[in-house]
Image (spheres, grey):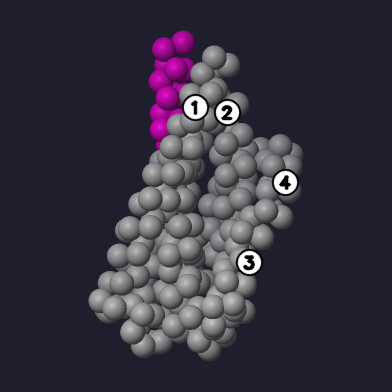
Amino acid sequence: PSRNADSRSNAGWISGAANALVSTVMMATLVVGPFYLAGALGLDAGGTGLAMSAGPVAAALAGMPAGRLADRHGAGRMALLGLAAMAAGCALLALAPAALGVAGYIAPLLVLTAGYALFQAANGAAVMAAAPAGHRGVVSGLLTLSRNLGLVTGASAMGAVFAWGAGAQDLLAAPPQALAAGMRATFLAGAGLSVAALLAVAWRRA
């Protein structure tokens, strides 16, 4: 019993850490996206807001299907698939040339966001299923805490990566090429974080 309890505890910590990592990545889309869309692609405020809304819309539409996939094919397997999709979406955002315009931003963003929705549904289901009945409220609260910590970290750390990649102190005055470079640096880092989360979850399942 003690060994099983230790195993559940380790799995919980890994799930929380992975949750924080992917939330860090998702926050980057909110921090970096407006600078890239307006500064590098030349969209006005309305166009920027419309493009930014693609992610939340995708997350809302993917939520219920993601839960069904986790129930049907197994939460652990779907969590890995979601993380793989997130890594792919980040890589596409990093490598897509600015010449592709808004489509080159939105298409990878949809992949990234759908992967995030799938991971959240599957990870939450796996953690809650493994939690003892008398501790599920606490476990749910810890998952929320890890997600919020990731969002806070993403706002600061990923913003710093973007500024470093752009090589500019004043991002509002940075040229389009610098903002595109910042975008690449940010989402290459995001791909790395997604892969790290994937490896951690895969190790948990082994």
Amino acid type at circle 3 is Ala
Q: Is residue 2 magenta?
A: yes
The image position of residue 66, as x and y in percent, is: 68, 47
* Secondary element at image label 3: helix
Amino acid type at circle 2 is Met
104 relative to 113, above or below: below
Q: Earlier in the sequence, mark 4 or mark 2?
A: 4
Which residue was labeled with disc 3? 54
Which residue was labeled with disc 1? 139
* Secondary element at image label 1: helix
Distance from Cα at disc 4 to Cα at disc 3: 17 Å
Which residue was labeled with disc 4? 64
Q: Earlier in the sequence, mark 1 or mark 4?
A: 4
Amino acid type at circle 1 is Val
Viewer-nearest of labels 1 and 3? Answer: 3
The image position of residue 188, as x and y in percent, is: 40, 67
Distance from Cα at disc 3 to Cα at disc 2: 29 Å
Q: Which mark is residue 170?
A: none
Give the main secondary structure, helix, strand or loop, of the magenta stretch: helix
- Residue 143 in the figure: left or right of residue 81: left
Amino acid type at circle 4 is Met
Q: Are marks 4 and 2 in contact (CB under 8 Å)?
A: no
Mark 4: give few (<14), some (14-19) or many (20+) Cα within 10 Å.
some
Q: Are marks 2 and 1 in contact (CB under 8 Å)?
A: yes
Q: Are marks 1 and 3 in contact (CB under 8 Å)?
A: no
